[in-house]
Image (cartoon, rainbow, N blue to C red):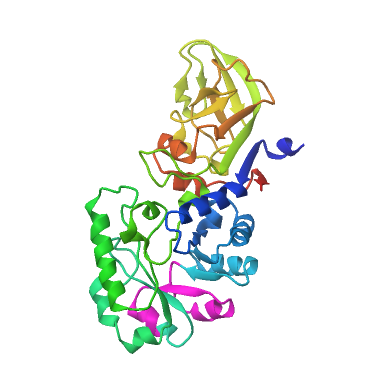
Amino acid sequence: MEAATHGARLTIDLSAIVENWRRLGAEAPDIPCAAVVKADAYGCGLAAVAPALWDAGCRTFFVAHLAEGIAARALLPEATIYILNGLLPGGAPALLDHGLRPVLGSREELAEWKGLGSAALHVDTGMSRLGLSIPEALALAGDPLATNAGIDLLMSHLVSAELPNEAVNARQCEDFASVRAAFPGVPASLANSSGCFLGQGAKNDLLRPGYALFGGNPTPGRPNPMRPVVRLEATIAQVRTVEAGESAGYNARWTAPGRRRLATLSLGYADGYPRAASGRGQALVGGVPCPIVGLISMDLIILDVTDAPGATRGGTAVLIGDGLDVDTVGRAAGTIGYEILTGLGSRYVRHYVE
């Protein structure tokens, strides 16, 4: 009955998330390890993930938006929660009401937050998105504007942490160290998921992994040290045989080169499986790789299951899992595993494993 309600099942292993958090923390055992749980905990469900991490000992959390912070606070009444996207105009009262801390990145934000509570200071060391420039940050040292803003954490964001040999990593670590020296006694945080593996210069006083918690590989090109978290399976709704020359899917983008067996799965891009994987991705049926053929549609995906004799109506195809991890699926769609994870739809039957 559960499978019939949608046709696809998303299994999320909470114990793997907790184990990944501990594994990342082990890279710097003397430094606290926080958790980035923005975008509904990277698509895995904040309501289930945040309490599991809290029970494991995580005490500091990062989200992107104020609304995410409010949701996190309802789940974690005693946690320290930072809002990465900063203080938007008029947002201070809601932040105060819910005991949330903005990550401030401009003098205007500092002025608006003056005297209101604790906050982090975001220093831009290379991303050119949010944050104060290095000269601006150094000029703030000793300035009452910073003192009155309740700065309890210095932050920056690494540009290419997943590429450890990139020169920009060393430069960012050096620049961030200069800012840290200008704010003695204020804890600092630079290491994201991949930054946890960059060495001592990136670790500072607080690790803040995100993607790797959810099974993404923080060390591309090397074996993934993280446990897999997400498994996506779909029920085969129908199996049919087509002859050479027959097409499948919208716009007849695929034509059978010979007699083929096709299986249709009950999920599509409305469920977050990327349309860009059309003709490039694959699923596993009975352990056999089966290519996606034709265009992925809103609610359906077609597989060529000619080489999978076990493919039958009511059978199962694995779209994420058993070696098809989120990074592999992302590459097949011409994107990254982050986008696959955060795009996972809400229509699936969701099952949490503890």
Front in this rendered view, residue 106 or 267: 106
Front in this rendered view, residue 339 or 182: 182
| Whether residue 270 is situated above or below residue 63 in the rendered picture | above
Quick one: quadrant of the N terminus? top right
Q: In which quarter of the image is residue 235?
A: top right
Farthest front residue in view = 30
* Residue 277 image point, x, y percent: 45, 34
Is 59 left or right of 181, judged from the image as shown?
right
Q: Residue at x 25, y 50 (%)?
A: 166
| Whether residue 233 is situated above or below residue 310 in the rendered picture | below
* Residue 226 image point, x, y percent: 48, 44
| In magenta stretch: residue 29 | no
Is 252 left or right of 286, judged from the image as shown?
left
| Whether residue 182 is situated above or below residue 324 in the rendered picture | below
| In magenta stretch: residue 108 | yes
Q: Which residue is drawn at 66% across and 45% down?
A: 353
Front in this rendered view, residue 189 or 85: 189
* Residue 325 image point, x, y percent: 49, 37
Front in this rendered view, residue 122 or 270: 122
Residue 217 in view in this figure:
yes
Q: Which segment did they paint magenta?
A: 84-111
Is 28 left or right of 202, judged from the image as shown?
right
| Whether residue 181 is situated above or below residue 213 in the rendered picture | below
Q: Residue at x 33, y 78 (%)?
A: 184
* Residue 21 image point, x, y percent: 52, 54
Q: Residue at x 28, y 62 (%)?
A: 173
Residue 89 in view in this figure:
no
Total numbered circles: 0
